[in-house]
Image: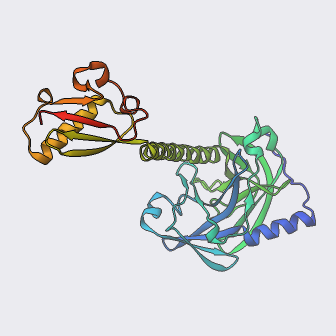
Amino acid sequence: MNNTSSSEPITIEETQKILEQMTNCICKVKSKGIYGTGFFCRIRFLDNTFIKVLTTSYQILDEHYFKENNEINLIINNQARIINLNKKRKIYSNKDFDLTLIEIKESDKINDYFELDENILSQENPKLFYENKTIYIIQYLNMEKASVSYGIFNDLIDSEIKHTCSIKPGSNCSPILNSMNNKIIGISKISEKNENNKGIFLKVPINEFKKQIEAKEEIKEKKVNIIDNKLKDTNLLIEKPKIMIVFKTGKGYSYGFIVNYGITVEQLLQKFIKKVKKIDNANISKSKIKFLFNSVKMNENEKVLKTLVEKYFENRRLPTIIVTHL
């Protein structure tokens, strides 16, 4: 580990950018009567879509908070703001990283965001890439005024950053930024041992958050496909061609049947017997009835019985079946 002690100079343009970030992109998050640090960030996906999030400490907003509360109270640039939780939002919480991400909606009217430095995801060896680079941390000095602290990225062990920036109590989850592009690479962390020059590198939690979203979207897509397929099946049933067939008995009664294509002649005859039993309370059976069409005894011909109605009555506008012994 190279303990470079001095950071690179910052230009007036870079300073102006940092001042804008200090004013608009960080906030105080209130929970259980105390305030913690939060900030707004845009995260890009491979398809060039973005999700906007509020990032804060898990100690401030954990899973229990979202079960027991319907809003988040913020202070942005000394102005009180409320984020209503009545809309469904994507939320990621990780106690080990002391991190919670909450989706920001357009209706929240948050206009300014940090950008995520995508080098944290794309670099094969991020330790070598960031080592000795100048970084800065935007924080609330003792949870009062916004301030910035400059330093050096010294080391990366697993997901833990070691740096030389000065941070104060209450600065958990303050954004750590790459001074070369003013983009987010991590969050500050004050350990139980009061070791203040540490932070969390965001590669692992951001990847976990993306996978969580992608998994939910995949489940949603499967549900949509199932619904679409059911609708298609329903439409097929609705649009399925039908045929009207008349049964005429020896007693002079006529029964009209409208049936879907796709049933067999045998199924048609069974439908007729079932209906006649129900309407006339007739004690009949298939063996006592003869069905005639074009002088063919339908129920005595196995080939006819297995034929589909649309095929058997093809080109017949209103086929009539004669029923005997009824």
Where residue 15 sits in the image (x, y, percent)?
A: 87, 66
> Observer-nearest residue: 194 or 78?
78
> How many numbered markers are drawn?
0
Where residue 188 sits in the image (x, y, percent)?
A: 67, 56
Residue 171 found in image quarter: bottom right
Where residue 276 sits in the image (x, y, percent)?
A: 16, 42
Q: Residue furthest bottom?
A: 79
Q: Is residue 98 visible?
A: yes
Q: Is residue 138 above or below residue 256?
A: below
Residue drawn at (61%, 76%), measured in percent from left and top? 81
Residue drawn at (33%, 37%), measured in percent from left and top? 319
Q: Is residue 288 above or below residue 120?
A: above
Residue drawn at (29%, 44%), measured in percent from left and top? 257
Where residue 277 sits in the image (x, y, percent)?
A: 13, 42
> Observer-nearest residue: 173 or 71?
71
Residue 51 found in image quarter: bottom right
Q: Is residue 273 above or below residue 139?
A: above
> Observer-nearest residue: 209 or 196?
209
Q: Is residue 7 above or below residue 86?
A: above
Residue drawn at (70%, 57%), measured in percent from left and top? 42
Q: Residue furthest top?
A: 302
Q: Is residue 2 visible?
A: no
**Quadrant where the N terminus lies?**
top right
**Quadrant where the C terminus lies?**
top left
